[in-house]
Amino acid sequence: MRTLFWKLALILVSGTIIEWKGLESGPWFFWLGCVSIPVVLLAYGISRKFSMTSWLPAKPAVLSAIPVFFIVLSFVFPALPEPPPESWFQFDRDEPDYEHRFLVKAQIQSSISPGLFLSRMRIQDFQKDRDPSYYGEDWKSISGQFPKTNISNSAGSSEYKFGWLPDGLLHSRQSGKNPQEGSAFRSALAIDNEELYPGCILSLQVYGRGVPQKPYGGFGEYLRSKGANSYLRVYEKWHVLDQDCPNHARQRIRTRLFKILSELEGESAEVGRAIMLGESGWLNAKLEKRVRRLGVMHLFAASGLHLGIFYGIIYWPLSLKLGRKHPLALFLPLLPCALYAWVLYFPVSLCRAFIFILLLALRSLIHRKITTSHHLANTALVLILWDPPGFYSLSGYLSFGAVSGILLFYRAIEQNLFVARNLLTRALRSQLALSLSATMFIAPLLVFSFLEFPFSSHLSNIVMVPFVALMLPPLYLVVALRMVPALDGRLLQAFFEWVTVPLEWFIWLARSLGNWSLFFRYESWANFAFVFSWLTMLLLACSMSRKRWLSQLSVRLVLALILVAPILSLFMDGVFWGVAAGPAAELQEHWNTLLTDAQRIH
């Protein structure tokens, strides 16, 4: 328990610094690591001298790992990106200027969602069109003609306003150096090309309505957490002058996967891409809205469910032949899992699942018993060193919160739900316990972050999670075999048509269940769903009580709350109770009409 306390302290301290300093955390971790060396030595010496070792870890050597952890974290933490120059934001898309343009090189660094990328941009030139007629175009560089000045103090002359650039580029132009020596910065780039990938280099002309903006609002905060200090939306037809994408192995694999999935049509192709690639952005807006209102968006995030199935497809036959704890059976399935994570560019939820399985395999190999809490803490520490900003992000919190709830509370919740006397009721109890335990920690965070809550999410998860768990194994297996061109033939293509039929069933389920969704939106985080989620979490935590009556009472009170909460939200009026959306809005409107008629009668 003492060692666990120190592990949790490391996680908490690291998270506090990252949430406080953001991308500026690297130097702080280095300073903290250096300071902690004498502090740890002094504390250990005093504790040993005065026999006060009860607060030390069970293995004192763990203390020496504290400064090492912080120093290593300072080196693996990504560097703070350079901010874009103020001149980058001088255009206004509401008053488009087609007589001046930036020439920019944009290199894709990562994908945020289909069609939205984090890119590294470098301003190459700033030009003016000397022939602004409709059919004319005669661009001339004006980068170094005018002195640097602040836009807010400009005299109103367009040449005076638009004639300056950041110091690096301005000096490079005046000295005759290559303009690419100007400083680079990160920007979110939205473009009508979903097939781009990290490594692609675009030559852009930034002008007209395709001009950058400063990120603002909740979405802006999300982009800034990714290191993007600007947001630029462009279109290939008008703004992309040239494009160069390297043909590396990872992209060839993704291209092959897209080619296989392109055999599907309509929404089936969208669902196939979204599930296989772990990005809900591949869904059309209407289907994505239905899925979100059902509370099953996690099915389209590459996570433990997907990697567990991927691992199990290979582990199960090997374990039958070699034994459950044979090294080959434990570690061989990790190779395709690592390949899967690599192809998807290591999303944090998938990395969490991979590290968890890897440590589990190592634990089985060395026959060492480790409690669930220690295993979760070890996974967290490794993941922090692998991707510190990713772990301390909304995706990281949701992924780790869900698996922690399942591993720590699933069994206790299942035992105290209700008596199951046959296979069907046992399956129902198991899925309900899985849904309750997975959401108990993350529901308050979801309500706080998105100001919305699907009260019918547990019903949706009971139906759709086992359906997807049955649908994915044959789909993964057939697609994996077809990824090898030598094996791809008529037989596998016929099997592919068969295993993709459940995708249509999934869409039908989403539409059918969506007609019964109880989804509410709120204006602030102080709302009924936020209170409900906290109360549910506290009651479910009581399921671990040694007093059987208390654990049963708390879990069954949660069941009662799940039934009563949406009814209260529907029939109560006020900002605190929220506004219904979708089918629930019709019920709420009908109830309000009845109340209005009753008031008129009286």
Image (cartoon, grey):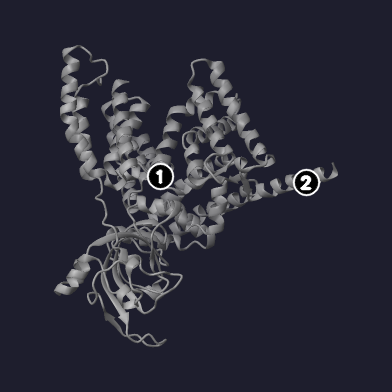
Percent position of residue 471, x then y: 50, 47
Residue 300 x/y as whole percent = 46, 49
Q: Is residue 478 visible?
A: no
Label 2–label 1 contact, CB within 8 A: no
Q: Position of residue 578 (x, y in %)?
A: 61, 44
Q: Residue extending furthest right?
A: 601
Per the image, the residue denoted by label 2 is 596
Residue 105 shown left or right of residue 498 in the figure: left
**Quick check: 72 left or right of 514?**
left
311 versus 103 height, above or below: above
* Marking on residue 77: none
In this view of the protein, can residue 378 be seen by the observer? yes
Q: Amino acid at mark 2?
A: Thr
* Above or below, comparing residue 552 to residue 321 in the picture: above
* Residue 150 placement: quadrant: bottom left
Judging by the rendered image, the residue that carries numbered circle 1 is 395
Of helix, strand and loop, which one carries label 2? helix
Label 1 element class: helix
| Residue 32 screen position, x and y as percent | 21, 35
Residue 184 appears in which quarter of the rendering?
A: bottom left
Q: CA distance from mark 2 to mark 1?
A: 44 Å
Residue at 61% across, 31% down: 561
Front in this rendered view, residue 189 or 422:
189
Please tell me which residue is depicted at 66% across the width and 37% down the height of the picture.
Answer: 568
Amino acid tagged 1: Ser
* Neighbours of disc 2 within 10 Å: few (<14), some (14-19), many (20+): few
Name the foreground residue: 128 vs 529.
Answer: 128
Residue depicted at 17% across the width and 17% down the height: 46
Q: Give the vertical position of 73 relative to 206 (above or below).
A: above
Number of other residues with Cα within 10 Å of mark 1, as a class: few under 14, some 14 to 19, many 20 or more? some
Task: For marks 2 and 1, give the one nearer the viewer.
Answer: 2
